[in-house]
Image: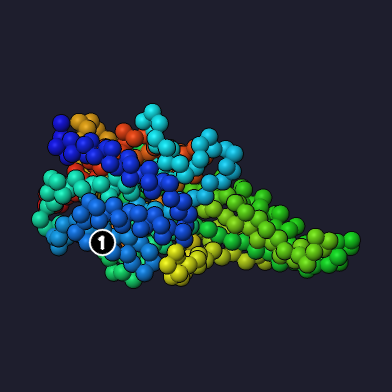
Amino acid sequence: MNDTLKHAQQLEADVTAFLSDIVKIPSTSTNEKDVIERIRREMEKIGYDEIKIDPQGNLFGRIGSGARVIAIDGHCDVVDVGNPDLWEREPFSGTVENGILYGRGSTDQKGGLACAVYAGKVLKQIGMPKDLSLWVIASVQEEDLEGVAWKYIHEEDGFRPETVIITEPTNLNIYRGHRGRMEIKVSTEGLSCHGSAPERGVNAVYKMAGIIADIEKLNERLKHDEFLGKGTVTISDIRSTSPSLCAVADGCTIHLDRRLTAGETIDTALAEIRALPSVQAAEAKVYVHQYNVPSYTGLEYPLEAYCPTWVLEEDHSALKNAVQSYRNLFDSQPKVDKWTFSTNGVGIMGRYGIPTLGFGPGNEVLAHAPNEYIPVDHLPKAVAFYAEFVKNYVSSKK
């Protein structure tokens, strides 16, 4: 048996107990303080060489003291529970039954983060490469907007590693990219009047009706990429304003979830919407949603809701090391694929060009779903992969 995997398997009970603890801590975006503190204590217990929290609230733990720097990133925030009636167990129970650990965030993505923390323990046991430093990062606010933490980490903390592993769920496969994402607002203006005489006003909802139909048709003709798949657009919210429920609507706004495949950008996506005949006829405003919600520390760090597409090249040395590390551990060929959803990779590689790949325990189909769970046997395998990747990193880059 591979020595790294052997050490990781010996830690299965410890990483499972740790994951159960942090699943029990509700930590929706901007409410991560308690889980950050719990993870910090675990890093101290393991013996990380340096631990710090930045002004935004992101937690950093370092193993090793080499000049070359790589990172493993996992966001510690989770989405809310939704309808509690859909859950068979208490959502934050952290219960372990028959080899399954249940609870919100177990797969998305505290499971991967817990494994990254324990990879640090394995590396202290087997030895870190002398010229390398590994930082394990518990990032915040990802569920609100992917990449907002890494904008702060990169631009304000000045942290710029050579390579990053994202611990989002991949079902123990290796992922090398995904489509981008942006949030677009389309607004129409009307003229309110009493609802008993609608002919006296201009209904902003009616002006929006043609736009809605055109956006549905636009989705059918968006670009397709062989690896990433098709670009998509869907309306996820619609709201109107009026002086009263007995009045004609004087404003209407729709919120678009736009997924960007290869070759699509913020400029092309906005131009497509603005070119729709119904948008022009209604003189509608088209703009990108701005995210400006303070972190749990109170820090405000605005960012437009644009998450660029990213793909790591098939022949990149980091991907080759990931594939070889997988073979070393499991004596089989890994599946190399992509996420359907979006991750912090939109900031790390999409915005800043830092080579990035993904590997995580759990299946992404369980993300944001009721009755979320993670197989316990995934945990030591993920711990081993992160440690093996780091162990072989320096030699793979020569």
* Residue 5: quadrant of the picture: top left
On screen, residue 326 versus residue 97, left or right, reads left
On screen, residue 312 versus residue 339, left or right, reads left
In this rendering, the answer to whether 4 lies above or below 39 is above
- Residue 362 or residue 219, whichever sits in front: 362
Indicate how the structure is coloured in the image: rainbow
On screen, residue 1 versus residue 272, left or right, reads left
On screen, residue 77 versus residue 287, left or right, reads left
In this rendering, the answer to whether 17 lies above or below 347 is above
Q: Residue at x 62, y 61 (%)?
A: 186
The residue where tag 1 is placed is 51
Tell me if I can see residue 40 in this picture. Answer: yes
Q: Position of residue 282 (x, y in %)?
A: 70, 63
Inspect the image, locate mark 1, and give the three-letter code of the amino acid beneath it: Ile
Tell me if I can see residue 351 in this picture. Answer: no
* Residue 55: quadrant of the picture: bottom left
Judging from the image, what secondary structure is the residue with disc 1 in?
A: strand
- Residue lying farthest to the right in this orientation: 196
Q: Position of residue 147 (x, y in %)?
A: 40, 59
- Residue 372 or residue 217, whichever sits in front: 372
Q: Residue at x 33, y 67 (%)?
A: 54
Q: Position of residue 133 (x, y in %)?
A: 18, 58
Q: Residue at x 41, y 46 (%)?
A: 23
